[in-house]
Amino acid sequence: MKARSSSAHWNFVQTGSELKKCLTKLIETSSLIAIDVETTGLNPFKDQLLLVQVGTRTEQLVIDVEAVGSDIQVIAPVLAHTSIGKLGHNLMFDIAFLEAN
């Protein structure tokens, strides 16, 4: 699927195998990723993580956490990788939800 910009692509990810494939492509193309999460509230131990967005300048993934299920764990090594820079707004909030889930 294409985003509005002709040079940017996004994928709505709903399976673990699709997530693995898309993450591999994403980290092969950039050493900097942007991260954002969408939740049902502010408490990472009470509220639900709904979506995780991870992207580069040219590729974005919108990950449906419920559909992906436990395969969301494949994102952990990418987020922990020290040679991949992370960019986001209020990353401490996002990280708290990612760690709790």
Image: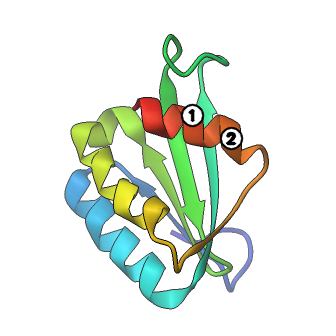
| Circle count | 2
Question: What's the residue type where badge 1 is placed?
Answer: Ala
Where is mark 1, residue-wise? Answer: 96
Q: Position of residue 22 (x, y in %)?
A: 37, 71
Q: Circles 1 and 2: CB distance less than 8 Å?
A: yes
Q: Position of residue 64 (x, y in %)?
A: 42, 42
Per the image, label 2 sits on a secondary structure element best described as helix
For residue 100, above or below residue 8: above
Task: Name the residue: 45% across, 37% down.
Answer: 99
Q: Position of residue 48 (x, y in %)?
A: 49, 20
Identity of the residue furthest to the right in this view: 89
Side of 25 where 1 appears, left or right: right
Label 1 environment density (alpha carbons within 10 Å; few <14, some 14–19, many ≥20):
some
Task: Name the residue: 24% across, 47% down.
Answer: 71
Task: Name the residue: 32% across, 60% down.
Answer: 19
Side of 78 where 4 appears, left or right: right
Question: What colouring does the structure picture have?
Answer: rainbow
Where is mark 2, residue-wise? Answer: 92
Residue situated in front as seen by the camera: 99 or 38 = 99
For residue 11, above or below residue 9: above
Identity of the residue furthest to the top in this view: 46
Residue situated in front as seen by the camera: 68 or 93 = 93
Question: What's the residue type where badge 2 is placed?
Answer: Met
